[in-house]
Image (spheres, grey):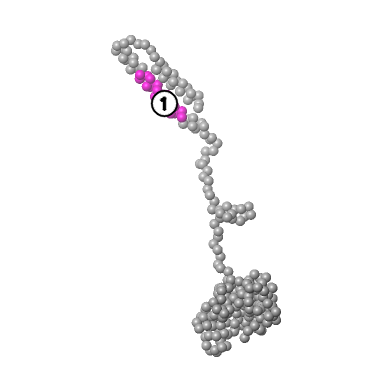
């Protein structure tokens, strides 16, 4: 508060004190006039004190402010995500949209890391094979293993996902399971028209000229293999990538 403010308040209180000080006066009309005059002076002094206080309050408040920063208050904001020291978004960050599903492809040389000609041990090491017990590479042909993720067989004729290991050749044939397709796009369940559109050379060796039975087509990019494709009454029911000289069946 400034010296000027102090003087105003002191003068006002002095006037108020003088007006409010008790005194003895004569009675009668002169006494009444004196009383009214004293009350007016008291009221004026009180109003003067109130006015000074009202003027002084903002000045006191202003004097108490830190006037070093006159800008607007800083508003904290929440970032969309935080970044760890390594530069990777923290767990609170919104994940980016997931990519398209991984395409499961059979051919031209195998199924991922699982390749035609591999030994049972090499095939199991890929993590793509499920076997009940040991694959017997002493047998002429072992068909006890399956691709990982193959659904349970519906009957004994169901060969989806089945693997055939030849004692002489190693992994000789890989049968597709649902969801697996050839590089050219053939999948289980496709129609005869779709099959012919993808592999025009396919024809049935069981019923020549008919849209049913099994047939064979060359594997683009692998002259040592062939696709064995079987048509049911309305759709493709078997697709196998196999060595051309496989000795497990037919």
- The segment highlighted magenta reads 39-57
> In front: 248, or 199?
248
Residue drawn at (49%, 30%), measured in percent from left and top? 60
Query: Quick one: which residue is furthest to the top in this view?
Result: 26
Q: Is residue 44 magenta?
A: yes
Residue drawn at (50%, 27%), measured in percent from left and top? 1
Query: Quick one: which residue is furthest to the bottom in this view?
Result: 208
Q: In the structure shown, which secondary structural element does the residue marked by tag 1 occupy?
A: helix
Q: Main secondary structure of the magenta part?
A: helix
Query: Quick one: which residue is furthest to the front in this view?
Result: 133
> In front: 36, or 4?
36
State the image coordinates of residue 5 (x, y, percent, origin top left): 47, 25
Q: Is residue 192 above or below residue 20?
A: below
Residue drawn at (54%, 83%), measured in percent from left and top? 231
Q: Is residue 161 above or below residue 247?
A: above
- Residue 237: quarter of image: bottom right
Residue drawn at (42%, 24%), measured in percent from left and top? 49
Q: Does the image show residue 196?
A: no
């Amino acid at each position: 508060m400034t010296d000027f403010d102090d003087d105003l308040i002191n003068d006002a209180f002095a006037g108020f004190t003088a007006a409010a000080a008790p005194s003895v006066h004569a009675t009668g009309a002169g006494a009444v006039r004196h009383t009214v005059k004293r009350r007016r002076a008291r009221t004026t002094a009180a109003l003067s004190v109130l006015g000074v206080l009202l003027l002084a309050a903002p000045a006191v408040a202003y004097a108490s402010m830190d006037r070093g920063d006159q800008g607007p208050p800083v508003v904290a904001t929440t970032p969309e995500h935080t970044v760890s020291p390594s530069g990777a978004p923290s767990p609170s960050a919104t994940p980016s949209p997931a990519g398209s599903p991984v395409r499961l492809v059979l051919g031209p040389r195998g199924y991922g890391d699982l390749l035609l000609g591999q030994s049972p041990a090499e095939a199991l090491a890929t993590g793509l094979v499920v076997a009940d017990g040991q694959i017997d590479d002493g047998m002429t042909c072992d068909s006890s293993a399956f691709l990982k993720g193959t659904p349970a067989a519906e009957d004994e004729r169901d060969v989806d996902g089945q693997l055939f290991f030849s004692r002489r050749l190693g992994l000789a044939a890989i049968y597709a399971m649902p969801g697996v397709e050839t590089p050219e796009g053939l999948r289980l369940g496709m129609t005869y028209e779709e099959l012919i559109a993808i592999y025009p050379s396919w024809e049935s060796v069981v019923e020549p000229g008919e849209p049913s039975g099994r047939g064979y087509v060359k594997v683009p990019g692998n002259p040592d293999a062939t696709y064995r494709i079987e048509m049911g009454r309305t759709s493709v029911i078997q697709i196998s990538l196999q060595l051309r000289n496989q000795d497990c069946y037919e």
